[in-house]
Image (cartoon, helix red, strand yellow):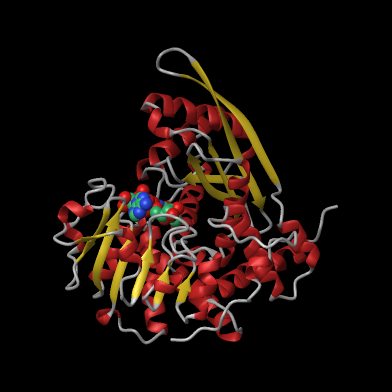
Amino acid sequence: MTMASRSENAREETGDGTVDTTEPESALETARRQLYHAANDLDIDPNIVERLKYPKKVHEVTVPIERDDGTVEVFTGYRAQHDSVRGPYKGGLRYHPDVTRDECVGLGMWMTWKCAVMDLPFGGAKGGVAVNPKELSAKEKERLTRRFAQELRDNIGPNQDIPAPDMGTDPQTMAWLMDAYSMQEGETTPGVVTGKPPVVGGSEGREEAPGRSVALITQLACEYYDQPLEDATVAVQGYGSVGANAARLLDEWGATIVAISDVNGAMYEPEGIETAAVPSHDEEPEAVTTYADTVISNDELLTLDVDVLIPAALGNVITEGNAEAIAADLVIEGANGPTTSAADSILAARGVAVIPDILANAGGVTVSYFEWLQDINRRAWSLERVNDELEAEMQAAWDAVQSEFEQRDGSWRDAAYIVALSRIAEAHEARGLWP
Ligand code: NAD
């Protein structure tokens, strides 16, 4: 397989003329870099690009909670709303000590591109609270969530901004948020958040959706490069919600999963791992290596000579330092931002195809969209319908990106961003600038 190299000056596109060579890059840097990069290739009104550089609004709130010992502790929460030209804002809420305003803005922009590449009628947002959720009891986490929901109440809603789970938050967090919002509104409003438990309006298949979309995109990419899935060897970094679901589906569809990993290291079986027999992060946390005969490191997993590499654990793992050593022909990004832009250029020059996160793991936000549709229509879908519709959406997004990829001398990432940005720019042009 061959691919044209990305623009040589990709790392100069920081917008302020400086050359950024430090790694890892922040979410905001990455999101802006992708915006300039895609805009360079498109005949877009620069005034629209200028508007997209900034979030529409960033809400910063103080969230005081009573700890179990009776003391009061105050946390800071954010909700960055980037762009809503195509529909209500959509994006996760994370509880993590490193949450900052800028990180929320960057990740919110990323959501704008992700929703647009999937052609969902949503814009992008991200938020969170700077807190270590592991230091909170369940009751404290509930109080934090209810108070945060109250502080954000005027700015979220099924037609305004629809949060979802992210790092440190889960379906239970979304159920509390939905309850707090509904109690204040005086009516049950399930459509205010997605990723809820199905019993309160969550969707079947939501939990598995990002991993399922990674598997579907892997299948489509293998087809594109004439690599039969039954002959493909696959290494997957991370065996959580994304990694384990993707690995198990690909295993079921005939691929040979030769390596899987968690934070402790990787299990390596050249003849193929029986993925159903190894518990995922959710089923038994960090247990992968205890089931392995042969353990290798996560770094070794990344450089295995496989057909497909799926980084599905965390960001910035394929860097300038190891990009030359990546031996896979195809990288499918399961995690958000696993490839730094320096690594991206190296992989492109070497002819390694990288299918970007905003397409590959977008099954999560796509099934969130289905959940929102079910909530506002008060009608639940079967798991079969969710999976069928997800497959159709992934195929449509793949087709749009593939067509762009074939028309231009660039990477799959460029193609995905161009598809996204042209949809957003067209919507801005059609709506115009108020007043
Ligand atoms: P998870 O917590 O379910 O699982 C993470 C897995 O990665 C675990 O197996 C963990 O042991 C492993 N891991 C953690 N640190 C590691 C390290 N240093 N080296 C190797 N493995 C390590 O998380 P997830 O929900 O599967 O998310 C994984 C990635 O996918 C993240 O980047 C996340 O942002 C992204 N993502 C998740 C979703 C979603 O809805 N779950 C959607 C889109 C993108």
Residue under the image location 66 percent in, 51 percent down: 82
**Front residue of this view, candidates 380 and 344:** 344
Residue in the picture at 36% in, 57% down = 242
Residue 249 image offset from top left, x and y in percent: 28, 66
Quadrant position of residue 83? bottom right
- Whether residue 159 is visible here, answered yes or no, is no
* Residue at x 53% of width, y 44% of height: 163
Residue 174, quarter of the rendered image: top left
349 lies above or below 19: below
Task: Tell me where residue 79 appears, x and y as whole percent.
Answer: 60, 41
Name the residue at 28% across, 47% down. 282
Q: Is residue 56 above or below residue 238?
A: above
Q: Nearer the viewer, residue 138 or 205?
A: 138
Q: Can you name the residue that lies furthest to the right here?
A: 435
Q: Position of residue 7 (x, y in %)?
A: 63, 76
Residue 394 seen in this snapshot: yes
Q: Between 200 and 146, which is closer to the camera in this rendering?
A: 146
